Image (cartoon, rainbow, N blue to C red):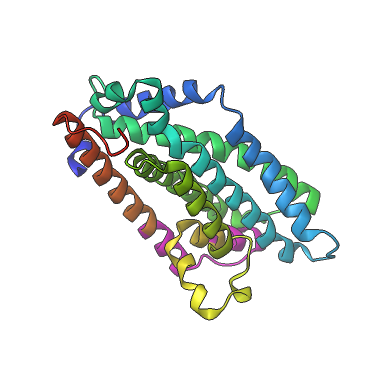
Amino acid sequence: MFTMLVEKGTLNAVLAGSRMQYREARGDWFAPVLCVLQPVALTVTLLEGHHTAPDQRIPVLVGAVLTSLWSALVWGAGGMLRRDQYQGTLGAVITAGPYSAGLVLLGRALGAAARNVMVVCLTSVALAAYLGIMPSLGGLPMLFLGLFLVLATGSVIGLLLSCLFLVTRHSQHLSGALLYPVHLLGGLVVPLSMLPAWLRWPSSLFSLHWIKEILVNALSGGVLAGEALVGSVALTTVYAVAALRMFSHIQQRSRRGEGLDFQ
C-alpha cells in the first residue's frame, strides 16, 4: 500500500486525478452552495441577537465553516466512486490506465477537497470581515497550518467516504447517518460543554474537531496546542490508511471478478 506513495510517476498520477475530478465537478453546484449558504446561515443564526466580542465570535465562525465543509465532503467527494459506478466508468477508474489507481483516487479526493476548501475560505473571509475578525500577523503561520490540515484531512475523508459508500447498498442512508451525528457530537457548532460528559468523547475521533482548535487559536492570537496538532495529524493518517486499505480490497475483489456488495 505504501509503496505506491514513492513509486515513479506519483506526482503525475495525483495531478491526473485532480484534473479529472475538477472537470467532473465543474457542473456540480450543490457542494459549493453548501460551502456558501450553509456557513452564512449557521453563523448568522447562532450569533443573532448576541452582542459578542470578536474572540467569542471566532469559535462560531470556524465551527460553522468546518460543519459546512463536512457536509460538502459527505454529499460531494463521498460519492465519487458511486457516481463512477452509475456512469459505467468504475472499471476504468480501478485499472486507472498507466497510473496506480490508488494514487489517481487520492488525486481526485484532493481535487474535490481543494475546490470546497477554496470556496469555504472565500466565504470565511467575507464573514470574518462582516464580523470584524482580523487575524494578527503572529497568528498567520498557525492559520496557514490549519488550512493545510483542512485540505489534507478533507482529501482523505472524501477518499474514505467514497470507498465506504461504494461497498454498501445503502449509501444514501449511511450519508445521513454520518452527517448529523457529527453536527451534534463533533464539537463544531454545538459546544461540548452543552453535552453530557459521556457524550463528549466522540468528538476526539473527528479530525476537524482538533483542527477547529488550531484555527480558533490562530484567529484569536493563542498558541498552537500540541494536543490538537497531534490529534489532527494522527486521525488524518488513520483515515488515509483505512481508505487505501479499503480501496485495495475493492480492487482485488473487482479483479477476481467477485463484484461489489451492491451489484
Horizontal relation, residue 114 to residue 32: left or right: left
Q: Residue, x 32% and y 29% (percent of image)?
A: 104
Horizontal relation, residue 48 to residue 35: left or right: right
Q: In this view, does 20 lie above or below 48?
A: above
Q: What main secondary structure does the magenta stretch of the protein show?
A: helix
Q: In this view, does 263 lie above or below 161?
A: above
Q: Residue, x 56% and y 27% (percent of image)?
A: 28
- Picture coordinates of residue 47 (x, y %)? 78, 60
- Picture coordinates of residue 188 (x, y %)? 59, 60
Q: Residue, x 63% and y 41% (percent of image)?
A: 35
Residue 242 in view in this figure: yes
Would you identify the image quadrant in which residue 159 lies?
A: top left
- Picture coordinates of residue 240 (x, y %)? 33, 48
Decide which of 169, 3 is in the foreground and name it.
Answer: 169
Which stretch did the figure color magenta? 214-234
Decide which of 237, 25 is in the foreground and name it.
Answer: 25
Horizontal relation, residue 34 to residue 238: left or right: right
- Picture coordinates of residue 15 (x, y %)? 37, 26
